[in-house]
């Protein structure tokens, strides 16, 4: 078997308002901003398949990992909307690990974050004993928060 893939570089999401999304990912989830830039045409247009592509983009690092989140706000072409429900094919989510799910839930709830569920105990499988919930980012993109199960002796 040929193994062409050797790693994971980033996870990207298209957002409607980059500044609003940055407030969510930085201020509420604690991600570290690596940089903001604007691209018009060139290699980006070739990669995404829109000759008129013009985006504002940001890269953030998830604290405690090397994983990067890439956010694109399309200035052109005009973006559309998808039904971003967990059950819909193609809908993605990221799962952020948190130390205290209840405290994080209460803090984000007070900040007006839209939740799909409250904290739920994982009662089976490899993550049994952990706790998790789903929420929406400002554009309705599903996200998961996960508290690891207690360490076993």
Image (spheres, rainbow, N blue to C red):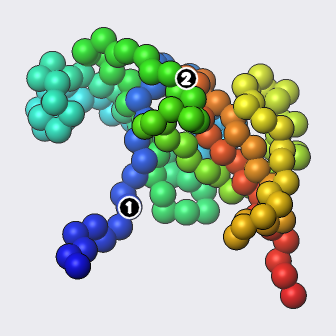
* Circle 2 residues within 10 Å: few <14, some 14–19, many ≥20: some
**Could you tell me residue 85's position as x and y percent?**
57, 29
Residue at 40% in and 41% down: 12
* Residue tagged 1: 8
Quick check: 129 above or below 84?
below
Dot 1 lies on which element?
A: loop
Q: Which image quadrant for residue 49?
A: top left
Q: Give the Cα distance between marks 1 and 2.
A: 24 Å
Residue 22 visible, this angle:
no
Dot 2 lies on which element?
A: loop
Residue at 25% in and 74% down: 3
Residue at 74% in and 30% down: 115
**Could you tell me residue 67's position as x and y percent?**
48, 57
Q: Nearer the viewer, residue 144 or 99?
A: 144
* Residue tagged 2: 139
**Could you tell me residue 50's position as x and y percent?**
17, 24
**Can you say which quadrant of the picture contains the C terminus?**
bottom right
Between discs 1 and 2, the one toward the N terminus: 1
**Could you tell me residue 146's position as x and y percent?**
72, 54
Q: Which image quadrant for residue 8?
A: bottom left
Q: Which mark is residue 50?
A: none
């Amino acid at each position: 078997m040929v193994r062409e893939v050797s790693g994971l570089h980033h996870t990207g999401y298209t957002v409607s308002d980059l500044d609003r999304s940055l407030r969510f990912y930085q201020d509420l989830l604690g991600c570290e901003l690596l940089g903001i830039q604007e691209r018009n045409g060139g290699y980006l247009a070739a990669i995404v398949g829109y000759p008129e592509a013009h985006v504002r983009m940001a890269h953030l690092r998830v604290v405690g990992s090397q994983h990067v989140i890439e956010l694109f706000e399309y200035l052109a072409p005009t973006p559309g909307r998808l039904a971003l429900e967990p059950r819909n094919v193609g809908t993605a989510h990221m799962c952020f690990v948190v130390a205290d799910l209840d405290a994080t839930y209460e803090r984000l709830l007070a900040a007006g974050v839209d939740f799909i569920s409250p904290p739920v105990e994982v009662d089976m499988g490899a993550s049994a004993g952990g706790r998790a919930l789903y929420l929406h980012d400002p554009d309705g993109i599903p996200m998961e928060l996960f508290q690891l199960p207690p360490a076993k002796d």
